[in-house]
Structure formats: structure tokens, C-alpha cells
Amino acid sequence: MKSSLYLTSILINMLKFLVILLAGLFELSDAGVQLYTGIDLNVYNDRVFLCLGHTTSVNNECVCSLGYEPKQNMCQACVAGFYKEEASNTSCVACLEGMSSFEGAKEKTDCLCLEGSSSDGHQCVLCSANTYKSFIGNFSCLNCHENSLSVSGSMLVSDCKCDIG
């Protein structure tokens, strides 16, 4: 992946240079390529100016962007339940147990509590008895209707059963 992205970047930069050269903004001499202002462009050799797809330039190398990891010679979005906070060619990191994220998550805070649990500010905890939560998120669990009960970790309002009596 690195070499194909690098070659693509080189080709694009060569085309840009050719267009500018043809426009007459540069002069070629034995001293190298220079702008008419006298700036030596040789100092820019081997630098990456443009990375394609879901990549970005880090230390003159095209690497996968935040929320993307290298797979099959390209950068693919982190799958649900994973995130990646840095631009690099490293793998995505799994959310903590009981949490998930949406595809392409870029931060640990993108990991959210699963159904039947809510955040206590540090981690996900099961909904207490007589409450439920039917969606992913760090929101509070909802109370069952009056005179109904549920077990800890309930996910649906239908888990709240009518109290005997």
C-alpha cells in the first residue's frame, strides 16, 4: 500500500511540476530547478504533497487517516466496535467490553454503551432493575411504567412486566 500511494503521489507531483514548467514560471539550469525568484526547488524532492483516498501525509509518507486502518493495500474504515485516534498504518482499537461504535470511529469517546446499559461516567453498567434501554448510547436507562418490574440489564420496554397484585 505504501509504495502504490507513494508512486501515485510522485506522479501527481510530476504532473503539477510539468504544468507549472510549461507555464514558464521556472527555469532549468545546471544548478537545478529554480523559480525566477531564485528559490531552489531541489529541497522538495521526495516529499509527499498529496495523499489520496482515506490517507494523509505524516513525515512525508501517506498513512491511513483517523478512523481507518490498512487492509488489502488500501485504507478501510474501522468496523463497528473499533476506533483509531491517530493517522498511522496501525490497526483500529477495540472498544471496551459492553461498548460499541459506529463504522469509522475516530475517538475512544465514539464508543457507546450497548442496549441494556448506560454510562456511569467511566464505564458502562447494566441498567438497574425496573429500568431498560433499547438503544446504543451513553444516555440513562428509562424507568419501567408504574406498577411494572424488570430485571437488571433489560433492553426493551416489553421486558417490564406487570407487577403481581
Image (cartoon, rainbow, N blue to C red):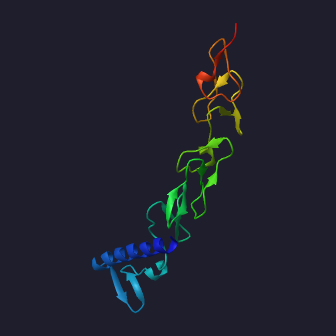
Which residue occupies the extreme front position in the image?
Answer: 164
User: How far across and how far down the image is residue 134, in percent?
Assistant: 58, 30
At x 70% / y 24%, what residue is drawn? 151
At x 52% / y 59%, what residue is drawn? 65
Task: Tell me: residue 82, above or below residue 90.
Answer: above
User: How far across and how far down the image is residue 139, in percent?
Assistant: 61, 31
Number of residue marks = 0
Q: Quadrant of the C terminus?
A: top right
Residue 26: name its quadrant.
Answer: bottom left
Task: Tell me: residue 161, above or below residue 87.
Answer: above
At x 67% / y 41%, what residue is drawn? 98
User: How far across and how far down the image is residue 136, in percent?
Assistant: 58, 36
The answer to whether residue 81 of the structure is visible from this angle is yes
User: How far across and how far down the image is residue 138, in percent?
Assistant: 62, 35
Task: Tell me: residue 142, above or below residue 148.
Answer: below
Which residue occupies the extreme bottom position in the image?
Answer: 30
Residue 15: name its quadrant.
Answer: bottom left
The one nearer the camera, 75 or 39, is: 75
Task: Tell me: residue 131, above or below residue 89.
Answer: above
The one nearer the camera, 100 or 34, is: 100
Which residue occupies the extreme left position in the image?
Answer: 23
Please give left or right for residue 2 compared with residue 31 in the image: right
The answer to whether residue 120 of the structure is visible from this angle is no
